[in-house]
């Protein structure tokens, strides 16, 4: 298992499953979903088409990780620790790159 920013990276399949759960969670609230679509520039049709695309799932986790309140709420509902989405993000395309923002 690799290490990224001092955190063990999870298996890619687990990461994809978590990102898909995060997307489903975002979709339960119109305001959250519209925020995600606005940030990514994706439309609902593209969302449906790219649900299994690891790169797109990385965007889902990027969005979740950009908002602490959403991150905490998702983790509480999913029953996971707040660092788990970061571990998942590191396992998806582009996740090993540092985020300087």
Image: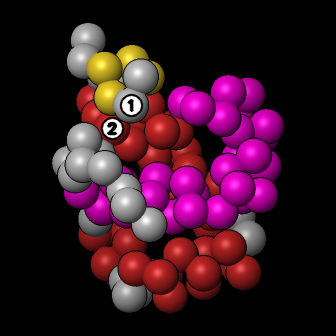
**88, above or below 56, in the image:** above
Residue at the spot x=46%, y=53% of the render? 61
Q: Which mark is residue 5?
A: 1
Find residue 31 and report its horizontal and vertical position in percent.
72, 81
Q: Nearer the viewer, residue 7 or 32?
A: 7
Q: Choose top left, top right, bottom left or bottom right for residue 7.
A: top left
36 relative position to 53: left or right: right
Q: Is residue 69 magenta?
A: yes
Q: In this view, does 11 lie to the left or right of 101?
A: left
Q: Tell whether position 86 is magenta.
A: no
Give the residue at x 77% y 58%. Answer: 69
Give the quarter of the image for residue 2. top left
Question: What residue is drawn where x is 75% and y is 46%?
Answer: 72
Q: Is 97 displayed left or right of 79 in the figure? A: left
Tell me where the magenta segment starts and ends, as one range.
55-84
For mark 2, give the secondary structure: helix
Q: Name the residue under label 2.
A: 90
Prevailing secondary structure of the magenta residues: helix
Q: Is mark 1 on a helix, strand or loop?
A: loop
Does the rendering let one see residue 10? no
Percent of width and height locating residue 46: 32, 78
């Amino acid at each position: 298992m690799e290490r990224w920013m001092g955190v063990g990276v999870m298996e890619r399949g687990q990461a994809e499953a978590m990102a898909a759960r995060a997307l489903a969670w975002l979709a339960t609230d119109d305001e959250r979903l519209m925020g995600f679509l606005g940030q990514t520039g994706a439309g609902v049709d593209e969302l449906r088409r790219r649900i299994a695309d690891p790169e797109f799932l990385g965007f889902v986790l990027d969005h979740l990780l950009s908002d602490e309140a959403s991150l905490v709420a998702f983790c509480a509902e999913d029953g996971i620790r707040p660092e788990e989405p970061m571990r998942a993000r590191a396992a998806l395309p582009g996740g090993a790159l540092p985020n300087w923002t």
